[in-house]
């Protein structure tokens, strides 16, 4: 089903399958026009709006009411909002279970179908779903009502969403409610819920961990077919004895001369995989996915990709668009950002304070763009904040584990949410807990705690410094011991390590620098604003060359890809128009 909306001269469509890492044929897109209402007095549940919706406005989903694309364009904070729409079950799907899926909704989402309460989910960035089969009528239209509760609390993961009524610093307009795709999926009684895919390039094998929703009473088996560019590599069958099964298979094959094809930024080779579930020899569930054969490791102070050191040239990417804010307006918009990032000579992005749309990660997988996936921060420390953060972070790791483009997890940034981490043992312990929990769920990727400064336990030491002068930067960092033994604050502001922690030979990467802005009274950048393109390029070249000249620094991340509201230090304007010739930036980034 294809739904579109028009705002002025622009048409926004989100019609693609939302989750290409785990794709089925039977689904129904619920994006488009919904009924909508504000509920500032929070009377809706008491007055049973879920039974008789009193919605006088309309909104275009999945764009939040704060955006122009929603059709509402109200940046005022509203703590309670309601959505309403009807849907029919396609005739060919009436015998199946119906699953309602949200790719993201911020923050507490409650769902009713035909007046029946279905459930709730807390969190602004993780995907979630509900089985609504028991509440639907397959013979008529069904009424879907959603209430979303948000707050200005600093105990919930917010990322760059402001918690006061006006923008400030580098915090922007909040996003409330449904902001990624909503859809229905139709499933049999027994299904493949999830498959965790772990490449093992040292043994030319891939590990598959299958999870079923249940074991049927009859005999069942799963057939897995792995192919590369349409040619079958392996096919095998397993008969599960429990809902969780594990299999490792060697992928070496004569279909190409190298026997195995690795995933790299230069050659982002992907293997396709199809999972088919049979019950009594009848095919009942089929899922398509893919994976990349790649390995991330650390050795001798370097980050290695497939056992070879890689110099990371990253671009800070906050994922905002003018009319849609956090919601990507289209596949084409995401592809444009990726293509321009590559065209400017970067090989990756640090997705800053946002868990990005799954289709963005899909295109990074396809195009070979490295991704650092960073959690949205809380801003105060409490038991409630710890619980909110931990629960959602676990969901996110598990949901995005299979993407080969993601090479680093970043749960904490600049001591946000742990403001006294430099000395506070409780906050230090929390970050250690998240580090080890992340490693438990994913032993294959580096984890950074805490990006910017005041690290506790961390696989990479990630430093932030917005020094304007390349000469001053070089002089500050040329003595490694000065910085990494906490003898001086690395950026004249913060120490590299929290008290009680020390450098243990980890790779060092400058993960924020630059932030150069042109003279403009409407916003700000880091340091003095420049007047000309020549001045910009001279400063960019000077500081970037200085970073490359420090032998123990093995990568950098420039701030940032595009302007975001009042922060105007992007290499591109908000509309993605380049401020500087992209080939000139590429020339500087490519220079050795």
Image (cartoon, rainbow, N blue to C red):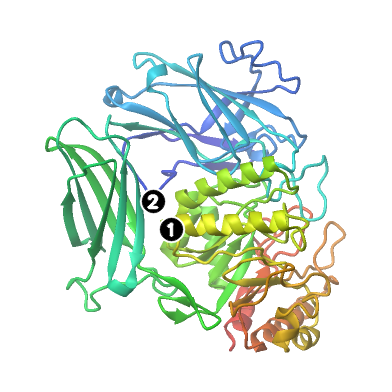
Q: 540 above or below 351? A: below
Can you see residue 157? Answer: yes
Q: 69 above or below 432? A: above
Q: Residue 579: percent from the left, percent from the top?
A: 70, 68
In whole angstroms, how far apart are the C-alphas of marks 2 and 1? 8 Å
Which residue is pictured at 42% across the width and 17% down the height? 135
Q: Residue 440: percent from the left, percent from the top?
A: 47, 56
Which of the 4 image quarters holds residue 108? top right
Judging by the rendered image, the residue that carries numbered circle 2 is: 21
Q: Residue furthest left?
A: 281
The answer to whether marks 2 and 1 mark residues whose Cβ atoms lie closer than 8 Å is yes
Which of the 4 image quarters holds residue 229? bottom left
Please identify the quadrant where the C terminus is shown: bottom right
Q: Name the foreground residue: 344 vs 315.
A: 315
Which residue is pictured at 22% across the width and 78% down the height? 257
Mark 1 residue crowding within 10 angstroms, few (<14) / some (14–19) / many (20+): many
Q: Is residue 406 left or right of residue 526?
A: left
Q: Which mark is residue 520?
A: none
Q: Which mark is residue 403?
A: 1
Q: Is residue 250 left or right of residue 375?
A: left
Q: Residue furthest right?
A: 521
């Amino acid at each position: 089903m294809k739904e579109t909306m028009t705002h002025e001269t622009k048409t926004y469509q989100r019609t693609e399958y939302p989750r290409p890492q785990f794709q089925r044929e039977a689904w129904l897109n619920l994006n488009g026009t919904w009924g909508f209402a504000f509920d500032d007095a929070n009377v809706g549940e008491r007055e049973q709006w879920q039974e008789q919706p009193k919605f006088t406005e309309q909104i275009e989903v999945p764009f939040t009411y704060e955006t122009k694309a929603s059709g509402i364009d109200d940046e005022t904070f509203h703590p309670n909002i309601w959505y309403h729409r009807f849907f029919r079950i396609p005739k060919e799907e009436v015998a199946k279970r119906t699953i309602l899926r949200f790719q993201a909704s911020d923050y507490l989402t409650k769902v009713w179908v035909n007046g029946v309460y279905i459930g709730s989910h807390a969190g602004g960035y993780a995907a979630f779903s509900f089985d609504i089969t028991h509440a639907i009528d397959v013979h008529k239209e069904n009424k879907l009502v959603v209430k979303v509760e948000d707050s200005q609390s600093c105990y919930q993961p917010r990322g760059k969403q402001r918690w006061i009524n006006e923008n400030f610093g580098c915090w922007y307009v909040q996003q409330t409610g449904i902001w990624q795709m909503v859809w229905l999926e139709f499933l049999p009684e027994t299904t493949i819920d999830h498959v965790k895919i772990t490449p093992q390039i040292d043994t030319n094998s891939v590990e598959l961990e299958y999870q079923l929703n249940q074991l049927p009473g009859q005999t069942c088996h799963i057939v897995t077919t792995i192919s590369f560019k349409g040619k079958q590599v392996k096919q095998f069958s397993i008969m599960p004895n429990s809902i969780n099964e594990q299999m490792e298979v060697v992928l070496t094959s004569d279909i190409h001369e190298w026997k195995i094809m690795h995933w790299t930024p230069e050659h982002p080779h992907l293997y396709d995989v199809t999972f088919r579930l049979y019950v009594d020899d009848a095919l009942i569930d089929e899922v398509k996915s893919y994976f990349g054969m790649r390995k991330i490791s650390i050795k001798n102070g370097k980050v290695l990709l497939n056992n070879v050191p890689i110099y990371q040239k990253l671009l800070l990417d906050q994922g905002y668009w003018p009319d849609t804010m956090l919601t990507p307006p289209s596949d084409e918009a995401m592809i444009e950002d990726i293509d321009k990032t590559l065209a400017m000579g970067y090989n990756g992005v640090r997705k800053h304070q946002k868990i990005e749309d799954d289709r963005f990660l899909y295109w990074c997988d396809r195009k070979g763009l490295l991704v650092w996936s960073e959690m949205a921060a809380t801003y105060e420390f409490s038991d409630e904040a710890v619980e909110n953060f931990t629960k959602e972070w676990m969901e996110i790791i598990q949901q995005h584990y299979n993407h080969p483009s993601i090479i680093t997890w970043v749960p904490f940034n600049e001591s946000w949410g742990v403001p006294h981490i430099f000395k506070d043992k409780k906050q230090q312990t929390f970050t250690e807990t998240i580090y080890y929990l992340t490693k438990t769920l994913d032993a294959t990727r580096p984890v950074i705690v805490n990006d910017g400064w005041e690290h506790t336990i961390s696989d990479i030491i990630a430093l932030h410094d917005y020094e304007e002068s390349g000469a001053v930067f070089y002089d500050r960092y040329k003595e490694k011991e000065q910085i990494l033994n906490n003898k001086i604050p690395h950026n004249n502001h913060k120490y590299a390590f929290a008290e009680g922690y020390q450098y243990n030979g980890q790779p060092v990467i400058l993960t924020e620098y630059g932030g150069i802005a042109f003279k403009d009274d409407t916003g700000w950048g880091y340091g003095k604003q420049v007047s000309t393109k020549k001045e910009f390029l001279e400063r960019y070249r000077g500081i970037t060359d200085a970073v490359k000249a420090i032998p123990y620094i093995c990568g950098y991340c420039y701030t940032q890809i595009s302007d975001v509201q009042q922060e105007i230090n992007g290499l591109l304007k908000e509309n993605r128009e380049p401020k500087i010739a992209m080939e000139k930036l590429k020339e500087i980034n490519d220079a050795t």
